């Protein structure tokens, strides 16, 4: 699989971006040249220089350090919220696809209802009600983005259910839980994996948007979204405050999308014609 | 011999876009302890649905067992709660399927799959179950079983895979093995080996075998009794030797005539004219009358019961045969 991924140039570069991001986020405390919260009133809005590679913000904080810590937020939000949404989507989808009938109807109508809410405004409403903490953000993103995975897994399980080995498993006296967990889901994982990676990109984008609007990660904690908010006020005098987080978001989302698309090609044998 | 499986008046229906269809419509038969019985018929006559009904694996919501009794050694299977039925599946009745290519899970090793089957019905540690799996692979005559247990299904040939399926099915020593066209997807030389294996294991383990097939040659060699199905009904039931010697139902007769025989067949093979009627548009009375060379006017009015014609052990559902005491052969 890795070898085939390497042949796919775009996917491979996406993988490199993602891997680099992981390293940066994990090693942020060691890589960051300054404390991201350290205010230095002598160096306000300094342009990029040898001392401050990416310059400083309106409170004299080192932008590079804040960007590195911001990567941690992005990574955390991406994975935790996708973890939540995948867990919900896979379990509900598998149950709906396996049992069909009334169970399926109830779950799928619930999916339809969830899809009717404009996700962004639902999140705004929930955050207005709860605290705007990063944990609430991840929870809400997770709880509002599982429907795609649910439909996908339902369809996969439904088609797997018609396969003989599923009937064979039942004919051996396996309980439904075991048939689903051992026999249906492992065969449905490839598309789920791809969707999850693409989902990470979506979650990161959503978190940035929420933080930009001031209802995500709260200052002074750095996140690419709220750095961008500060940057927008000073865009005339300090371009680096807008450009750096913007580029970071762009490259990250692009990286995840390329990796996801590439994995889809690699994992889906029906698309092998190349 | 004691009665092992007793099926009475079984009706299994499916909802289709053209209305409700009875794929199995009033099937009666039994299987004795240790006996090997063949269930024969054309595609779509309800053989597999009968088998899945016995296992209670007819998938809702479109399919359901409408009526009938299915007794296994005196226990009414249709009345069992699902958890107990699960004990029966695999434990008492096991089943192997037509397509060994698709009946194994592609993402798990065959050893794992057999060990899993073992652990469902027997309390064994993973290691014991694995050893049992290797022993089962040895039983079904797979060379180098310890090595093969670690193989994935795609690494094995069709015949090997069917052996693995048999090993899985037999891992909990069922009393009845239902084999649904176990050799249809295999090439001829392998077919013979698999049938030989099934038959010797049946004799060795003392289980009964319900062999579903459309190959009369298989029936003649391996089974003691034959059930002939047509359009959802059993139309003839009797010992293989007697039925092959003197069929009492025109459909059975037609099937036997259409088998090529070495040295005896000249020119075109005999065929049964017409096709199996659609289950949504069955003829009145006898379902076979449109294709039957012996049909009389009464056939359109009377739904023939399955009853002894020429001997007490052989029953057929044909009023002409019953009237004349047999058919001209």
Image: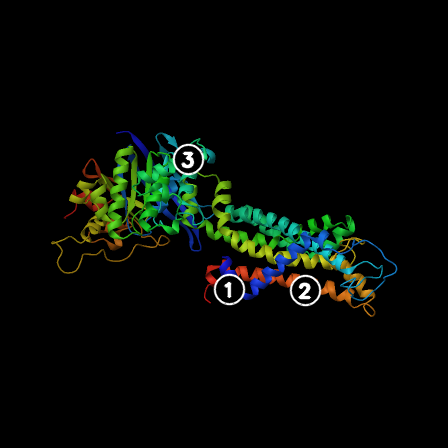
Residue beneath the point at 23% across and 40% down: B223
Q: Residue furthest bottom?
A: A236
Residue designated by label 1: A7
> Are both tags, 1 and 3, on one chain?
no
Residue depth check, mark 2 versus mark 1: number of the one nearer the observer: 1
Q: SS at mark 1? A: helix
Q: Position of residue B170 (x, y in %)?
A: 35, 37
> Are both tags, 2 and 1, on one chain?
yes
> Are both tags, 2 and 3, on one chain?
no
Q: CA distance from mark 2 to mark 3?
A: 52 Å
Q: Position of residue B313 (x, y in %)?
A: 21, 36
* Callout 2–callout 3 Cβ contact below 8 Å: no
Q: Residue furthest right?
A: A41
Circle 3 Cα neighbour tier, 10 Å, few/some/many (<14 / 14–19 / ≥20): many
Q: CA distance from mark 2 to mark 1?
A: 24 Å
Q: Position of residue A95 (x, y in %)?
A: 54, 46
Residue depth check, mark 1 versus mark 3: number of the one nearer the observer: 1
Left or right of residue A190: residue B6: left
For the N terminus of chain B, give its image quadrant.
top left
Q: Chain of mark 2?
A: A
Residue designated by label 3: B129
Q: SS at mark 2? A: helix
Q: Is residue A77 visible?
A: no
Q: Chain of mark 3?
A: B
Q: Chain of mark 1?
A: A
Q: How is the image coloured?
A: rainbow
Residue beneath the point at 61% across and 48% down: A88
Left or right of residue A232: residue B252: left
Q: Where residue A250 is drawn, which disc sits there?
A: 2
Front residue of this view, candidates A56 and B303: A56
């Amino acid at each position: 699989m890795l070898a085939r991924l390497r042949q796919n140039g775009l996917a491979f570069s996406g993988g490199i971006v993602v891997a680099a991001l992981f390293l940066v986020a994990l090693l942020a405390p060691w890589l960051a040249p300054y404390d991201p919260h350290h205010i230095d009133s002598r160096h306000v809005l300094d342009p990029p220089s040898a001392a401050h590679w990416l310059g400083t913000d309106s409170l004299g904080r080192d932008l590079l350090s804040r960007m590195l810590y911001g990567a941690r937020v992005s990574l955390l939000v991406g994975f935790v919220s996708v973890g939540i949404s995948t867990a919900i989507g896979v379990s509900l989808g598998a149950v709906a696809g396996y049992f069909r009938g009334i169970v399926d109807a109830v779950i799928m109508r619930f999916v339809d209802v969830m899809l009717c809410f404009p996700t962004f405004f639902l999140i705004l409403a929930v955050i207005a009600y709860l605290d705007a903490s990063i944990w609430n953000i991840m929870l809400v993103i997770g709880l509002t983005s599982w429907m795609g995975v649910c439909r996908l897994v339902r369809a996969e399980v439904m088609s797997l259910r018609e396969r003989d080995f599923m009937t064979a498993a039942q004919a051996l006296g396996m309980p439904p839980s075991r048939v689903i967990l051992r026999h249906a889901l492992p065969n449905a994982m490839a598309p789920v994996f791809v969707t999850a990676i693409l989902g990470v990109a979506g979650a990161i984008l959503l978190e940035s948007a929420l933080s930009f609007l001031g209802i995500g990660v709260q200052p002074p904690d750095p996140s690419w979204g709220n750095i961008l908010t500060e940057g927008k006020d000073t865009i005339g005098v300090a371009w680096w405050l807008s450009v750096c987080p913007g580029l970071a978001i762009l490259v990250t989302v692009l990286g995840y999308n390329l990796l996801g698309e590439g994995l889809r090609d690699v994992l889906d044998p029906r698309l092998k014609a190349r | 011999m004691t009665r092992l499986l007793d099926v009475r008046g079984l009706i299994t229906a499916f909802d289709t876009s053209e209305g409700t269809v009875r794929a199995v419509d009033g099937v009666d038969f039994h299987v004795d302890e240790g006996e090997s019985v063949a269930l024969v018929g054309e595609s779509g006559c309800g053989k597999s649905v009968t088998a899945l009904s016995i296992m209670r694996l007819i998938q809702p919501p479109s399919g359901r067992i409408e009526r009938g009794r299915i007794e296994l050694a005196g226990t009414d299977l249709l009345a069992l709660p699902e958890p107990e039925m699960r004990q029966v599946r695999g434990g008492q009745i096991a089943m192997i399927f037509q397509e060994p290519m698709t009946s194994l899970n592609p993402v798990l090793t065959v050893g794992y799959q057999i060990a899993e089957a073992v652990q469902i019905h027997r309390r064994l540690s993973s290691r014991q179950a694995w050893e049992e799996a290797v022993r089962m692979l040895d039983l079904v005559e797979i060379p180098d079983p310890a090595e093969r247990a670690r193989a994935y299904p795609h690494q094995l040939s069709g015949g090997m895979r069917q052996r693995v399926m048999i090993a899985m099915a037999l891992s909990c020593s069922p009393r009845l093995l239902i084999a649904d066209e176990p050799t249809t997807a295999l090439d001829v030389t392998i077919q013979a080996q698999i049938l030989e294996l099934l038959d010797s294991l049946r004799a060795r383990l003392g289980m009964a075998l319900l062999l579903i097939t459309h190959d009369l040659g298989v029936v003649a060699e391996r089974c003691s009794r034959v059930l002939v199905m047509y359009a959802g009904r059993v139309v003839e039931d009797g010992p293989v030797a007697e039925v092959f010697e003197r069929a009492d139902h025109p459909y059975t007769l037609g099937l036997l005539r259409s088998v090529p025989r070495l040295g005896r067949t000249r020119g075109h093979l005999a065929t049964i004219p017409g096709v199996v009627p659609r289950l949504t548009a069955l003829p009145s009375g006898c379902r076979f009358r449109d294709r039957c060379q012996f049909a009389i006017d009464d056939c359109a009015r009377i739904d023939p019961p399955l009853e002894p014609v020429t001997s007490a052990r052989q029953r057929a559902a044909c009023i002409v045969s019953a009237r004349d005491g047999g058919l001209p052969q």
